[in-house]
Amino acid sequence: DYEQAYLGHGYKELAIPPGPGGQFALDPHALHIWPRGGSMMIALPNADGSFTCTVFWPLEGRGSFAAFRTPEDLALFFSATYPDALGLMPTLTADYFRNPTGTLVTIRSRPWYYRDRVVLLGDACHAVVPFYGQGANAAFEDCAVLSETLARHAPDREAAFAQYESLRKPHTDALADLSLANFVEMRDHSASRAFRLTRRLEQELHRLFPRRFVPLYTLVTFTRTPYAEAVARARRQARALKATAAAAAAVVLVVALWLLLGRGGGR
């Protein structure tokens, strides 16, 4: 049982060099995203004051890696699409035409082991796209769970391998789905005011009710909650929020009707 699914997008690394005196040209305490609907660029800080920029573009078609053959075409596209970044990237043309274009793949597989002789961990059995930043963490979790099952079933390695796979696979499949969904969220939705308002609301609810409400991103990134359990909890929280919002709207409607009818009766 094996699936290898490539995105229709690839990636290429570019650079923003340090500013005068080695200063950062952008805020170093943030992930910078230029969402453009169907594509995006991100920038992450480095210790030397530079930023590594990565463009995630379609492999073919308009605005794709295949579309830019000359420095002039590339500069024209950046001036229209990333005008605020262009002035910070003096090596854009050299970086673009020198650096390779990478591909993005999701791998789902089964089984992860052969008898008691071989067992797979990490990207060898469940590679994911990088948009949740959890690939290495998932591999570390594999190690922790495999260590536990080996101790539990010693000296029966095959039983340990089988339990390790059964415990981990639902969560690595959930991570694959999360990573793909977050790519769409980053490139298509993060510029939306409604999206940002929703995220701020989630953070405020978490501040007010830290045990009862934890945003999905927080569950995945800052806790050891297994991925599938984090997704299930986030769905329960979303249903509860919708029910609460519906109830609040109903109360407002009832109060409004009561006031309206009360005033009408008074006349």
Image (spheres, grey):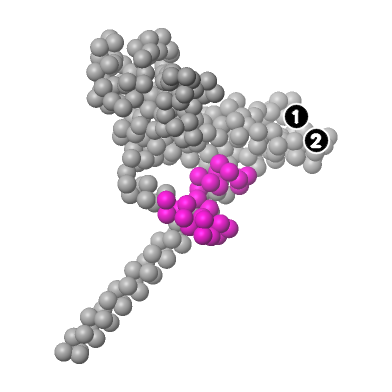
**Quick check: can you spot residue 14?**
yes
Instruction: Please determine whether, in this image, residue 93 is positioned above or below residue 159.
Output: above
Q: Quadrant of residue 159?
A: top right
* Helix, strand or loop under label 2: loop
What secondary structure characterizes most of the magenta part?
helix
SS class, disc 1: loop
> Mark 2 is on which residue type?
Asp
* x then y, percent, for residue 224: 63, 44
Give the residue displayed 37% in from the left and 69% down from the top.
248
CB atoms of marks 2 and 1 within 8 Å: yes
Compared to residue 112, the image places residue 67 above or below, namely above
Q: Which residues are magenta?
A: 200-227
Residue sitting nearer the eye, 39 or 19: 19
Work out whether residue 129 can be spotted: no
State the residue position of label 1: 116
* Of the pair 234 and 112, the residue shown nearer to us: 234
Report if residue 217 lies within the magenta region.
yes
**Labels 2 and 1: the sequence-earlier one:** 1
Q: Which residue is mark 2?
A: 156
Q: Left or right: 108 with respect to 159? A: left
Q: Amino acid at mark 1?
A: Asp
